[in-house]
Image (tube, rainbow, N blue to C red):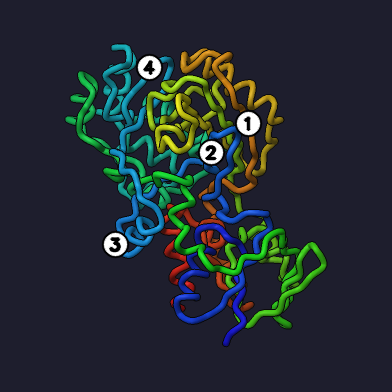
Amino acid sequence: MENIIILGSGISGISAGYHLSKNGNKPIIFEKNDDWGGLCGNFSIDGFRFDKFVHFSFADDSYIKELFESSSPLYEYPSLCYNYYKGCWLKHPAQNNLAPLPSDEKVKIIKDFVSRPQKAVDEIRSYDEWLRCQFGNYFAENFPFRYTRKYWGVEAKELETKWAGIRIHSPDLEQVLKGSYETQKENYYYTNFMRYPKKGGFRSILDKCRDGLDIRFNKEVVRIDTKSKIVYFSDNTTQSYDRLISSLPLPDIAKMIDDAPANVLNAAASLRHTSGYMVSLGFKRPDVAKYLWFYIYDEDILSSRVYSPSLKSPDNAPKGCSSLQAEIFFDSKTRIPNKNEVLKNTIDKFVAMGLFKEDEIVVKDIRFEKYANVTFDHDVYKNRDMILEFLRQSGIESIGRFGKWEYLWTHQAFKSGMDAAKN
């Protein structure tokens, strides 16, 4: 039997381990932390449970969907979310629901939408151009440009466009006009429903897959000798392998491999991503959260996206309580503010928005994750593909969002682990 090891116990690593085990293998998963789940993990404070960043499932693959549901019964919610902009609450997507805005602002948006630049797809060179062509200058500059700076930590002109796909709705004139008079009932989100476990937080969709897996915790990889097929850990232990599957981020694993060539190391150093804070708040009243999740465009408010764990499932908060979690992202190559600055800004601005009063907070917590999202700058594919080819030639199979360096939703990350097991 092959000696197979998997690096990382996030959703892709758990999926790879589960499907290899189904095929009669006995893989060992090595996890640098003391718990499994990766970014799908969670933590609890005084009866409040918080996921690591927002997660829902909208898997359309029948096998994956049924596997998730067999692990945990799921709530199913309509994809109804909102946007906060200059004191106004607009149903998402904002471009289709301009009704709450002042008339002068709506006129500027519609006027620029009608006269927006017209370019063929192959003429568009950046996300900046793409947004102007989709929405017109005024909307682009005041909505997605602002959000890009908050979510990606860069200007829109620094990004390419293939990652956008179906994630951003492009309205026609009739939709823009109707939405400027009244809130639209039609859903323009990229999926109609979001699913979330009734108990145990998001990672409980993996309980069936995780059951019985051999996961070794507190095993941080520091070096990989691909010629001798040995992995070295920070606790001075080693592990030999016949087959190595990794969900480690490409910038990290490239530096761990003996004799990695300079061009690969340079490519790894050039990959950009966001890092993020999670501000988690619990309240002693049941009705703080009004929306399942919402986006914030105002740039003086550091938070870009906020959701409610207690609305996702009552199991995430004590009876009679509610909760919010805010996400604050920064480009990995810029200065990241002190966590106390971020926490204070988040609470002060939310109070000013009228979401709650500060004396209603019973739990407040802030945590940092080095890897939040892949940044799709203009060199991303060239650099990524060079590293992946080097890993392939070195006998390492990469899986997961940061192992494949793709914008993968949770079910897609799960599938990447499943595909590796099939291979």
Classify 172 as above or below 75.
Answer: above
Is label 2 in a helix, a strand or a loop? Answer: strand
CA distance separating discs 1 and 2: 10 Å
Is label 4 in a helix, a strand or a loop? Answer: strand
Amino acid type of disc 4? Cys
To which residue does mark 4 refer?
88
Q: Residue at point 71% right, 59% down?
A: 218
To which residue does mark 3 refer?
62
Q: Which mark is residue 86?
A: none
The foreground one among 268 and 417 is 417
Tell which circle, 4 or 1, labels the residue nearer the N-terminal end: 4
Amino acid type of disc 3? Ser
CA distance separating discs 3 and 4: 39 Å
To which residue does mark 2 refer?
50
Q: Residue at point 45% right, 62% down?
A: 208
Residue 188: x percent and y percent?
26, 38
Residue 115: x percent and y percent?
27, 29
Q: Which mark is residue 365?
A: 1
CA distance separating discs 4 and 1: 27 Å
Foreground mark, 2 or 3?
2
Is residue 141 among what the camera can see?
yes
Amino acid type of disc 2? Phe
Q: Are marks 3 and 1 in contact (CB under 8 Å)?
A: no
Tell which circle, 3 or 1, labels the residue nearer the N-terminal end: 3
The quadrant in which residue 136 appears is top left
Q: Residue furthest right?
A: 236
The quarter of the image holding the N terminus is bottom right
Amino acid type of disc 1? Asp
